[in-house]
Amino acid sequence: MPFKIRRSAGVVAALAALASCGSLPVASVTITTSMSMPVAPSTSTTSPPSFTAPDCSLPPRSDDAVVFRGDRIPLMRVGAVSYRRLGVVLPTASAGPVVAHVCRADDQSGLRDGDGPFPPGTELHAVAGYDPRFRLGVVEGPQLVVMESIRNDAAVRGRDIVDLTSGVTAIEFREASDPTRLYTTWTEAGSIATVVDALHDGPAVPSNPSPNGVYLQLVFVMVDGTTVETYVDLASRMLTVGIGLPEGIAMMLSNGAASGGWSQPSAPTKPIGAPPPTTASPPVEERLVRRLADALGVVGTIELLDGEHGQGSCINRLGPAPMLCVDVPLWGLWQYADIEAQMLPSATEDEARAAASGLLERLGLPTELGEIGSNGAQITVAMRAGGSVVVAEGGRIAQVIAPTSMLPPG
């Protein structure tokens, strides 16, 4: 099937508003980032940011209490963390100890420490199973209103922004501009764990909406029946709350959504050293896909998929094992990704050159290499015949993007 870019000016406008922690119409809740920053493994020895009670010394900006205005998403800020109200409530039995109080009834744009959509002095409870940095609760009658974190200015890694450790039972893939449209649902434990680990380990990055983003909503269904809803920009490989994702995880999510009918981009950013062909090449035969997989050490069943100009092939496209896709989602290219390797430190230049040369030798191609570069986290090696190789420590290949002219001889 042809691939189409999913972009929405309305979605981008909503991203910009919530990224600054302003109040948004209910139908437009999302934030995102536009930077493309591959995930680098954490080397920080700094302790993760802890929960701190708000500073109530600041005076209110007006005497008007702002409590759950009907056309707005209620927002709150405590310390470095901004929260929004979840669409569900929990029984009061889920309320933990009081950890802070609301300072000012104010949920306007430009939240200050202690601002919230509740009367001053309202008790903020911990929520059972969650660190207060991620969820706070307010008791209202027989129910617990839950406020969930959407931003942490002190975050270093993704685990400082989202907490999925209490258990995810499913991941839903939904249309960004119409979340009622469900594409597919993952319930397989291995795939869920791979995505959750990548989110927790990803670097915290600034939020800045991109008009060229390719957005998808991800809904994490938790064991307590609540959900953690966020958006991902697959073009820049960013989780909407400001978490960078590895290329392999972005590909895994893209493939997962496509399996449910989501349309992928037809004109992605051109990979380094791998210009798309000017005319459509014929589909790659299955026997050549298998030879390529053998050379890369990819083991699994070949899955045939509809590509832009014919039938493409993938092995392990939903991970977490090393995956290989040929002619999908990009026609005329093959892509290899090892998600575990993408989380490792970078190779040295010598290791990278040796790994790239060894790959070309296994493919039966000339071992001529081009320039050495970096994707921001790991060394990349351009190949004279086209394409590029990303290499992790020890010479482990993390990613390859190459034209389908670079296949083992038939």
Image (tube, rainbow, N blue to C red):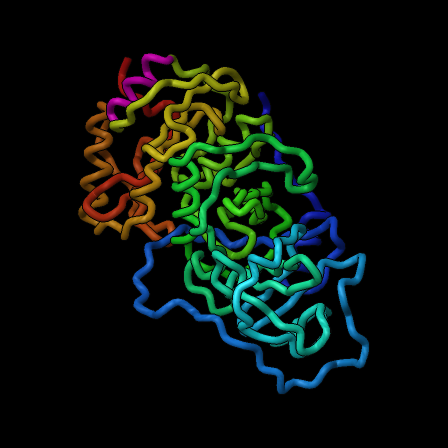
**Quadrant of the frame with the C terminus:** top left
Residue 149 seen in the figure: no
Residue drawn at (41%, 36%), measured in percent from left and top? 189
Give the x, y percent position of residue 192: 43, 39
* Residue 292 within the segment the image draws in magenta: yes
Q: Position of residue 219 (x, y in %)?
A: 57, 43
Name the residue nearer the viewer: 390 or 204: 204
Left or right: residue 113 versus residue 37 is right
Q: Is residue 398 magenta?
A: no
Q: Residue at x 26, y 28 (%)?
A: 296
- Residue 66: x and y in percent read 77, 70
Question: Looking at the magenta stretch, what is its main secondary structure?
Answer: helix
Quarter of the image that includes the N terminus = top right
Evaluate whether residue 190 shows in this view: yes
Q: State the residue in front, 114 or 173.
A: 114
Rendering quarter of residue 140:
bottom right
The picture places residue 150, in percent across and down from the top left corner, at 57, 59
Q: Which residue is nearer to you in this view: 283 or 366? A: 283
Left or right relative to 68: residue 258: left
Q: Quadrant of residue 67?
A: bottom right
Question: What residue span does the magenta drawing correspond to?
Answer: 286-295
